[in-house]
Amino acid sequence: MTPHISRRRTGLALSTAVAAGALLAAGLSSGGAVAQPAADQVPAAAPAALSANAKASLLQEADSAKAATARAIGLGAQEKLVVRDVVKDRDGSLHTRYERTYQGLPVLGGDLVVHTDKSGATDGVTKAVEAEIDVETITSAAAPKGARKVVWAAKGAPKLAFEKVTESTKKDGTPQELHTVTDAATGKQLFQWDAVHSGTGESQYSGTVELGTTASGSGYELTDGERGGHKTYDLENGSSGTGTLFTDDDDKWGDGTPNDPATAAVDAAYGAGATWDYYEQVHGRSGIKGDGVGAYSRVHYGNNYVNAFWTDSCFCMTYGDGAGNAAPLTSLDVAAHEMTHGVTSVTAGLVYSGESGGLNEATSDIFATAVEFHADSEDDVPDYLIGEKIDINGDGTPLRYMDQPSKDGSSEDYWYDGIGNVDVHYSSGVANHFFYLLSEGSGAKEINGVSYDSPTSDGEPVTGIGIEKAEQIWFKALTQYMTSTTDYAAAREATLEAASELYGADSAEYQGVDRAWAAVNVS
């Protein structure tokens, strides 16, 4: 199951049917439905959805019992707990997260999680560190200006320390929150970290970007702890396994060219982070599955592999290095396209065949475009073109055009009876065209320096409602009203229902949806 972009690429194909969608492939004519677990198959240990009031009640209960909890888990008389968070599983067990104090001072590295079963019995404790705390908290040394006195327990023997937080803004506008911990006795720096972001990289397609990385030993690993632990691996031109996790000594990744293997990793990690941010910030969805857990990415797949794909079985993205291993398929819209296949697989589950398959493909293009607009990068200016950065055709043209899909020589602009027999990579053009028209309207115009001229099947004009509203309508339709077998007619009904609930049945947005579908001959 792969998105096929150009018939000239007929030698490219995915080898299995578990890939929910590759950016480029050929010769695949069918795919299987992604099986979705029934509600009663959700593991009992999976987190349960909590209302704000329910969570507040659990936090209050934990706070009232924190002294007894501290005694029950064996903390010393000078130690106290401060409730920070609580998660309740479907089976009723609780996981309550605490910070710790020692003689009233915050203990950095003292955080822990107390696990209790549904009966309320303690079922284990997970601590950040196991070291016992026994330090002298009185010091004659003056604290640095603006610093607070703390107990440093995160590394080495616990000791009295000062923590100072310096807030600033980096040259590119990124805020910085630099924490510096110094030994209260010697003044020696013990540790330093940026609470906002810790890594930067030189990407091939998006310029210098901020990355989520994690300190490991004396270096860093490409694990984004702020976005579900997303990891980026190097397959080193292999075609199986997970690969080797990217690491770096100084947290400066790649050189902006394919000569450095880390450059592709930078683009993949950046794309994963930007996609996570989009779904969370725009749709309130934490991660692809909505469970707060990151997928992972694999780069340098195969040799001269001109493709990228999403695989449900590993819930991961995989990227080839392109022709001559010089143009990795790791641009932002490609990354977002692949991860959106995962979102579709755990929501509507659109079968990757017939009209539903075209809608599956289009959904990935739609949200790839939305992610690009949300990221709003100066180095990858938002547009309604797919794959414009990777030059896979070798002539500077993009893979797909949303304003007039047929400009790629293969995709369909309008629905017709029998379009379900067309390869899903081409029938997707109908929904892509609909989304462009809904967002921007018909006719000639220039957006962010790119010229568009979108036609309509009936020759009548369409007035756009803006991509911000169009993306909300499509997401609500996808996650609440589309099913595995939704065809174009049903997609029209789903988006009309979504528009009605979001903006009203008499709204301009509702009328815009109706008109945009008519413009691509769906009624």
Image (cartoon, grey):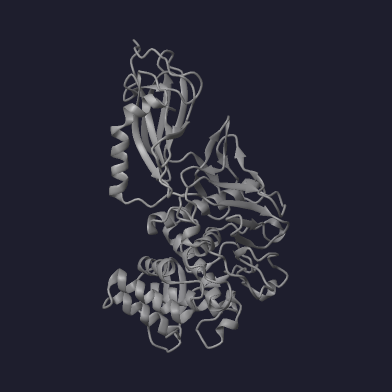
> 36 above or below 178?
below
Return the x and y of residue 204 as percentages of the image width and height. Answer: 58, 53
Q: Is the C terminus in the top left, top right, bottom left or bottom right quadrant?
A: bottom left
> 505 above or below 169?
below
Residue 462 in view:
no
Residue 172 in view:
yes
> 7 above or below 295?
below
Task: From the viewer's side, name the closer residue of 322 and 447.
Answer: 322
Image-quadrant location for residue 465: bottom left
Image-quadrant location for residue 169: top left
Image-quadrant location for residue 88: top left
Residue at the outermost top position = 140
Q: Is the N terminus in the top left, top right, bottom left or bottom right quadrant?
A: bottom right
Tell me which residue sits at (50%, 84%) in the image: 415
Task: From the viewer's side, name the closer residue of 493 and 333.
Answer: 493
The number of callouts visible is 0
Residue at the outermost front position = 119
Return the x and y of residue 494 as percentages of the image width and height. Answer: 40, 75
Q: Is residue 64 left or right of residue 271?
A: left
Task: From the viewer's side, name the closer residue of 170 and 459.
Answer: 459
Return the x and y of residue 83 as percentages of the image width and height. Answer: 34, 34
Return the x and y of residue 336 as percentages of the image width and height. Answer: 51, 60
Tell me which residue sits at (44%, 79%) in the image: 490
Tell me which residue sits at (47%, 22%) in the image: 190
